[in-house]
Amino acid sequence: MLDNKYNFSEKEEKWEKFWQENGVYKFDEKSNKPVFSIDTPPPTVSGHLHMGHILSFSQADMIARYQRMKGKNLFYPLGFDNNGLPTELLVEREKKIRAHTIPREEFTQIALDLVAKYNQSYRDLMVRAGLSCDLSLGYNTIDQRSQKTSQKSFIELAKRGIAYREEKPSPWCCKCHTSVASAELEDKELSSVFNFLNFRLADGSGTIPIATTRPEFLPACVAIFVNPEDKRYAHLVGKKVKVPLFEENEVTVLADSKVGIDKGTGIVMCCTFGDQTDVEWWKEYHLPLKCAIDDGGRMTEIAGKYAGMKSIEARQAVIEDLKTAGYIFKQDPIMHAVKVHERCEEPIEFLSKKQWFIRTSTPELKQKWLELGDELEWHPESMKARYLAWVKNLNQDWSISRQRYFGVPFPVWYCKKCGKPIFAREEDLPVNPLSSMPKEKCECRCSEFVPESDVMDTWATSSITPQINCGWVEDEKACAKRMPMDMRFCGRDIITTWSLRTIIKAYYHQGCLPWRSLIVNGWVMADKGVKISKHLSNSKMGPTEMINEYSADVIRYWCAIGAYGRDVYLTDDGLKDGYKLLNKLWNASKFVLSFMEDYQPKMPQKILPMDRFIMHKFNEAFDRACAQYENVEMGYAKAEVEKFFWNFCDNYIELAKNRLYKPEVYGQQAKESAQWACYNVLLGIIKLFAITMPHITEEIYQSFFRQFVGEISVHLTTLQKIELPQEQDILQNGDDVFEVVARVRAFKGEKKVSMKTEIDQMTIVAPKLEFLKECEPDIKAVTSVRQINFEVGDFDVKIGNPIL
RNA sequence: GGGAGUUUAGCUCAGUUGGUAGAGUACCUGCCUUACAAGCAGUGGGUCAUAGGUUCGAGUCCUAUAACUCCCACCA
């Protein structure tokens, strides 16, 4: 029946092909089964997937498989996020072109062609890893439909005043040539020099010491700040100070509590803009705006002789000149954390530009996000706290403009005369304003327009995947009915960005949550504290390599580990257990099925006690496993099934195999009874394990069970308990029999004799003997005890002598 | 500075509402037993991070402390 050895690489690919060819995972539009919908987070297309993706997707896939086998109609798409900077950089790198040198449509087409190749490799790997997505439901965030959805969302929000355009200083990456959201920044420790300068007071009454790491910002200096509590400098407040090297510029000394008295000299210069604090002071004190750096990171004309230099060159030049002119009195080398753009690790600047924002941070809105976060079902529950804490601290609106070329364009033009924005009509979407013009005139009767050249940040589109999935642009009412979707999964690092923004969009558009539950997976660690990522040289643990070496089922087995949401370590030891289980499952199935050659499953007239017991025991494990799956604990669910399975192998099969082998000794009825139990229990195990290990279970199902069950794949069967009449104390009674067997095994171990060694006699003492007596032939067979005596009393087993 | 998590056997981790500390693995001792030696049976091994508290009783609840991890804020 089954091959002697299970050859995973051959079988796994065979069944993956089978599932795709037979549409096993297809969403059925016409079905009247309840739908279970998953808003799969579209992976960013920037090169390759890593084990973190496999962990996250595999864990979610187990929920999908569980729900499917519980009779749900799965809506389980696999989309790709490819409208953002990472994809643009990928295309530029691979095709050796510069995005802004060719028309946007053309570049997008090149990107789509290239991305198709990457999508296919992602898809192939997802399939190879055993995921059960419906590949026909996929989308690209750069495709026409996603663009249309995203533009429709923008227009609707803009018309409602929720999206607005404003000039605001915001983080800017000079390398990527775009503004970036504060959530896209990270800290990097860099070495720098603290320069101590003497600023001259305008009235000639002396100098004041100021320390700075960015002296190239001197031309943008607009004020000096001291702490109002600082008695040393109280007399300075209100005085005018000359800016070194730019002495025609005089700025005022102001007092603000944000100044650290013991930091540097306790006096700070405020430039527009060196950092976030400068931005806040600039706003609060209505300071003038002086831009010393342009969007390419070069000094502007206000920098005088330094104009045109890169900021870092300018810094050196300025320091030299400061030294020559005698302004510098001390230089301290320091290490300090600098905000860098997470994509390119380049330090960011603050530049003031006109940007589109979405309102998210008023107290009323924040209250709403808190309520929605509370309404959402979180797994694990503790992740909610992160979200709530983040929302409470939210103090900026969501910036969605990017000064890039590739992406979803803003469908808007501005009137040349009055500046009023003209939005594209919905029926014309998607629109690229650079290549078309509004059909109507502006209210001011002007018919000339300036197109918006910015594109939307990728989050603006990836936050509407529920609307893309639910067909918002095709049918708003149907979409509203389909939302909220049932589940979204994501990593804990993007709760605050992706999840919150998706919640915000669903609230603005549909007035509901995007999904009922959010499951937050942990990270794959290469070793204690080392996250697997492409930045580290641990790509030998790439998913393809791992699957080829260990099999997809073993990798999935490992993915179902421990409590959901915790970080997991990827080690050889961790994979060994899965390998062992696969091997055991294969051997046990091979063995059991070898007694089923001509078997036609049929409930026998009489089922022997231990056969009834093992089926009840299965039902108990089944309930426990399902409860764990309902609670999004795939690891615990798997452990429940596994625990039962090893018990089934080591105790039940050992006991029943005598009856299967020798019907001439134990009777044909006894064999059929064992066959019935084995058939039901093995099928039940195969179905439960199909959630974790879809390949090997399919092979076993196809080799035997399919002919009786009927469904073309084990993954389309329904999880159910074995139908059995209630029976008092059956679980306890059966466990007692196993206990007797364990005592005899321990006895043989102590005597250092083989397990098949016969024992002359033993006495079983128990309060109730009826069940044990019924099992006498089984006990005798498995323990090789010649004669058994029974006595009423407290449970005990008295064992005689081995016959050597 | 704010928030979250972790700390239980050599290792990886369970331990629901408080009631005699569990599994796997490793180690050790046996066993070729007609599915599986990648197997089977069995032994040993823990001041549950530390210090207090509540309780008849604390791994579990409370308070503080320590170590490690992550997120956020600050970084002139």
Image (cartoon, coloured by chain):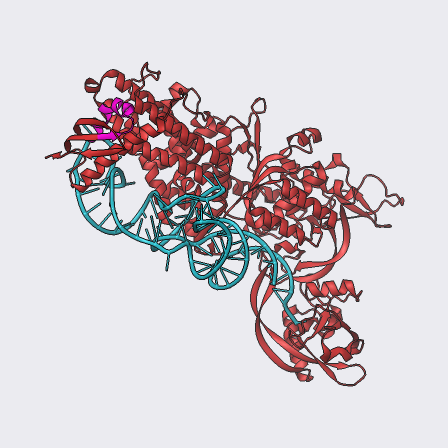
The foreground one among A139 and A377 is: A377
Return the residue found at the far top. Answer: A605
The foreground one among A122 and A55 is: A55
Residue A773 lies within the magenta run: yes
- Picture quadrant where residue A266 is located: bottom right
Using the image, determine if residue A734 lies above or below residue A487. above
Residue A224 lies within the magenta run: no
Main secondary structure type of the part rendered in magenta:
helix
Q: Identify the chain drawn in cyan.
A: B
Question: Which residue occupies 57% across, 73% down?
Answer: A334
Q: Is residue A517 left or right of residue A525?
A: right
Image quadrant for the N terminus of chain A? top left
Q: Identify the chain drawn in red.
A: A
Q: Which residues are magenta?
A: A764-783
Question: Quick check: can you spot residue A50?
Answer: no
List x then y, in percent, for residue A417.
86, 50
List x then y, in percent, for residue A298.
68, 66
Question: Quick check: can you spot residue A337?
Answer: yes
Return the residue found at the far left. Answer: A804
Q: Is residue A286 left or right of residue B24?
A: right
Image quadrant for the C terminus of chain A? top left
- Picture quadrant where residue A247 is located: bottom right
